[in-house]
Image (spheres, rainbow, N blue to C red):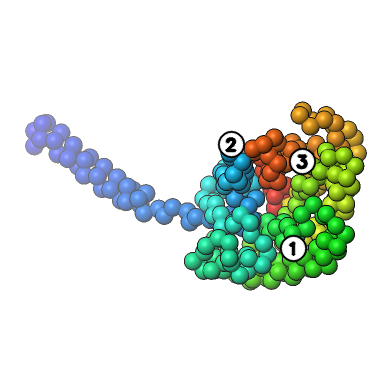
């Protein structure tokens, strides 16, 4: 065999060897399955959908809510995590169980949540829930002693009983190993402080009632092994001390200043007054959830 033929033959052998080696390696790479998706399920009322007032004063869902911001904080360390939001603006503990405000194929937000948790059992990493803020909504600004007594004696216990039922069904569907985090609530009615002595009395009394209500919610969460994001504390709701200058508002106690800073309650029309958190406020709530869940 001449030199040319020997070279050609050698080249052919090398080519076959390279093809033989590279073929299976390529096939092996293509067969590596992608990691399965994991899920963060966000449940609740308008806060879970990031509701804020638009320029016309209409309350609309946004992508700036606490689940969106919490998801952004979690995603870098959990690249397979997916956010699923099932919350319903205006939801109460009763409508979460029975439906009636938002439409769900399963009939209610709770049924939809249970269906999702069951279908994705073993792949749900986090469930957050905020529910109960709309249950005492009929209390309004606590205009009369009779209204206050009705709220404390009827609305509060009913909400806690419903929350017990919600959490029991969710825990059964999710399993004991799934991290679940609820939240306590901030208090928009602190903004009433700006309205002179009558408003200050409303703010003071509302804070006392909010402490009791949040304690009831916290106890319900604890019974189902659900952690609690201390949003009430993050907003320093009980801190009437100090005098903080707030532009456009004046000098007010610290808790009132934070309500004005982190919600739309002190905003001028048409966006205000609106009890929903603004983007910064939702960020505070997200970090409270992060702290509770870690």
Q: Residues within 10 Å of mark 1 (few under 14, many from 20)?
A: many
Quick check: 74 left or right of 254? left
The answer to which of marks 2 and 1 sits earlier in the sequence is: 2
Looking at the rendered image, the disc whose residue lies closer to the viewer, 3 or 2, is 2
Q: Which mark is residue 55?
A: 2
Residue closest to the eye, 82 or 213: 213
Q: CA distance from mark 2 to mark 1?
A: 37 Å
Q: Which mark is residue 221?
A: 1
- Which of label 3 and label 1 is nearer to you? 3
Q: Which residue is mark 3?
A: 259
Q: Relative to residue 109, is residue 6 depicted above or below?
A: above
Whole-percent x and y of residue 216? 81, 63
Depth order, front residue of 52/123: 52
Residue 149's spot in the image, x, y percent? 86, 64
Looking at the rendered structure, the secondary structure element under dot 1 is helix
124 over 234 or under it: above or below:
below
CA gap between label 3 and label 1 equals: 25 Å
Label 3 residue SS: helix
Graded by Cα atoms within 10 Å as few (under 14), some (14 to 19) or many (20 or more), the crowding at tag 3 reads many
Q: Quadrant of the N terminus?
A: top left
Look at the picture and state if 286 lies above or below 94: above
């Amino acid at each position: 065999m001449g030199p040319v033929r020997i070279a050609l033959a050698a080249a052919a052998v090398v080519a076959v060897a390279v093809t033989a080696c590279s073929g299976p390696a390529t096939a092996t790479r293509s067969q590596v399955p992608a990691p399965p998706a994991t899920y963060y399920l966000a449940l609740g009322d308008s806060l879970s959908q990031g509701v804020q007032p638009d320029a016309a004063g209409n309350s609309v869902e946004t992508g700036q809510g606490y689940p969106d911001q919490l998801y952004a904080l979690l995603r870098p360390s959990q690249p397979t995590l997916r956010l699923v939001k099932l919350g319903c603006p205006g939801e109460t503990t009763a409508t979460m169980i029975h439906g009636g405000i938002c439409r769900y194929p399963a009939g209610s937000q709770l049924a939809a949540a249970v269906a999702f948790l069951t279908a994705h059992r073993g792949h749900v990493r986090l469930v957050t829930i905020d529910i109960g803020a709309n249950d005492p909504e009929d209390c309004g600004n606590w205009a009369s002693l009779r209204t206050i007594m009705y709220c404390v004696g009827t609305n509060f216990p009913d909400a806690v009983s419903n929350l017990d039922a919600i959490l029991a069904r969710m825990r059964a569907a999710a399993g004991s190993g799934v991290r679940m985090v609820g939240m306590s609530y901030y208090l928009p009615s602190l903004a009433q402080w700006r309205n002179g002595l009558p408003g200050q009395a409303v703010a003071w009394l509302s804070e006392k009632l909010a402490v009791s209500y949040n304690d009831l919610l916290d106890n319900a969460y604890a019974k189902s092994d659900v952690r609690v994001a201390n949003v009430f504390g993050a907003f320093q709701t009980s801190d009437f001390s100090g005098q903080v200058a707030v532009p456009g508002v004046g000098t007010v106690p610290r808790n009132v200043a934070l309500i004005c800073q982190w919600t739309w309650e002190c905003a001028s029309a048409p966006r205000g007054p609106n009890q929903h958190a603004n983007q910064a406020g939702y960020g505070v709530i997200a970090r409270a959830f992060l702290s509770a869940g870690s």
